[in-house]
Image (cartoon, rainbow, N blue to C red):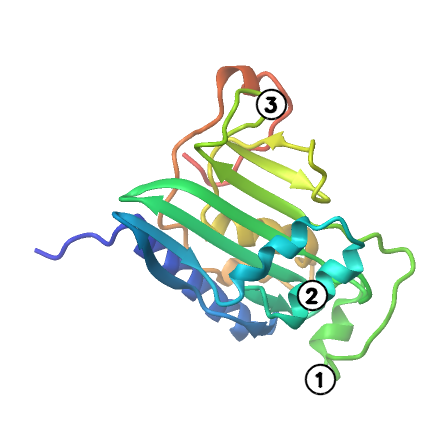
Amino acid sequence: MKKNPSPSHQIREDLEHLISELIGNGLSDDQNFPALRQTGNNKWEVSFQGAEHISIAMSDIDYDIIYSELLEKRSFNVKLVDGGLLQLSYIFDDNSLIKHRLAYYPSPSLRSFQDDPELYMREEVYVDIVSRRLIPFPLRFDYDVLAAKDIIHPTCHLTLGDVEGCRIPVGCPLTPRQFIEFVIRNFYQTEKYDFISTFPGHKLFFGSSISPNEQKLIHLSVPGAT
């Protein structure tokens, strides 16, 4: 009997399929496919080439410099058609998820996809158009069992703008499908361009990680979670 793949293998496979779909529908401009590697006894990491440079994002420097450094070092899973960068990494201890870092860094200079989708879906897709009314900021979903502290540091949380004290409780860890759908739905989906309907289906979910005290606060639920 064939054994079911481990959660780490499932995460890698789901991310591979999602990246292939982003390439196929024209949303991906460049990409690093995920790699699964063993980092210790029964510890596994799903990450990408260039992940060693993600500490740049925590530097106390202007966002446009952070973005340029990440782009130059190709520190991303996917560079989207409008310059947005997706980073996804997961760490497992045996079959248990202990940490993930899922980040989206929009381009500080290019017009967002939703602002002018026809620009990016035409053949001349690399036209540089600056939008002065754009205020780009990163968003990041973190999950960290070891760093968790009730309310102060929710096990899973959303950080906006890399602000140190911004930790919005999230109901549970996110799979690649959930995270990428969140980004595409909120920043790329339009009435004309429906990218999500062709995404691979949900194959796995993580259990709830939010505490009773955190449930009393405003928190972000995860679409599709059971």
Q: Earlier in the sequence, mark 1 or mark 3?
A: 1
- Residue at position x 57%, y 64% from top? 76
**What amino acid is at disc 2?**
Glu
Q: Nearer the viewer, mark 1 or mark 2?
A: 2
Mark 2: give few (<14), some (14-19) or many (20+) Cα within 10 Å: some
Q: Is residue 17 left or right of residue 62?
A: left
Indicate the secondary structure of the residue bearing disc 2. helix
Q: Earlier in the sequence, mark 2 or mark 3?
A: 2
Q: Which residue is mark 2?
A: 69
- Measured Cα–Cα span from mark 1 to mark 3: 48 Å
Residue 26, percent from left and from top: 60, 74
Q: Nearer the viewer, mark 1 or mark 3?
A: 3
- Measured Cα–Cα span from mark 2 to mark 3: 31 Å
State which quarter of the image contains the N terminus.
bottom left
| Quarter-of-image position of residue 117 | bottom right
Residue 143, percent from left and from top: 49, 38
Q: Which residue is mark 1?
A: 123
| Residue extending furthest toward the bottom | 123
Q: Which residue is mark 3?
A: 152
Mark 1: give few (<14), some (14-19) or many (20+) Cα within 10 Å: few
Residue 77, percent from left and from top: 53, 64
Q: Nearer the viewer, residue 14 or 37?
A: 37
CB within 8 Å, label 2 to label 3: no
- Measured Cα–Cα span from mark 1 to mark 2: 28 Å
Q: Is residue 221 left or right of residue 187?
A: left
